Image: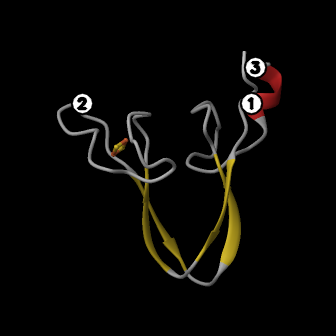
Amino acid sequence: MEPTKPYIVTEQPGTKYYCACGGSQNMPYCDGAHKGTGIHPHKVEIEEEKTVALCSCRNSAILPFCDGTHKALQ
Ligand code: FES
């Protein structure tokens, strides 16, 4: 099985919508695929340019960010 790793992204300031449903074709961002599921994207305000680690296993306690939980799942 392919190891799960977070998405490492350097973000510019602005409002970001990160996928919470796992169905986006544009991970880690929401592309609207959640419609009809009752799940909504994580809205995050990025104040300044920074590199973030975004959870891809969806088990993090600090979603949408990675907290290292994926390491325990492998
Ligand atoms: S596409 Fe997954 S939350 Fe919007």
Q: Picture quarter containing residue 10?
A: bottom right
Q: Which mark is residue 70?
A: 1
Q: Which image quarter is the N terminus in? A: top right
Going by the numbered disc 3, the residue's amino acid type is: Leu
- What number is the disc on residue 73? 3
Residue 74, position as x, y percentages in the image: 80, 19
Classify 10 Å Cα crowding around label 3: few (below 14), some (14-19), many (20 and above): few
Compared to residue 54, the image places residue 50 above or below, namely: below
- Which residue does the numbered mark 2 point to in the structure image? 37
Q: Amino acid at mark 1?
A: His
Residue at point 61% right, 84% down? 48
Report helix, strand or loop for mark 2: loop
Question: What residue is at 39 percent from the left and 41 percent from the top?
Answer: 24
Q: Quadrant of ligand 1?
A: top left
Local crowd at mark 2 within 10 Å, few (<14), some, or many (≥20)? few
- Is the CB–ligand 1 distance for label 2 below 8 Å? yes
Task: State the residue at coordinates (40%, 42%).
Answer: 25
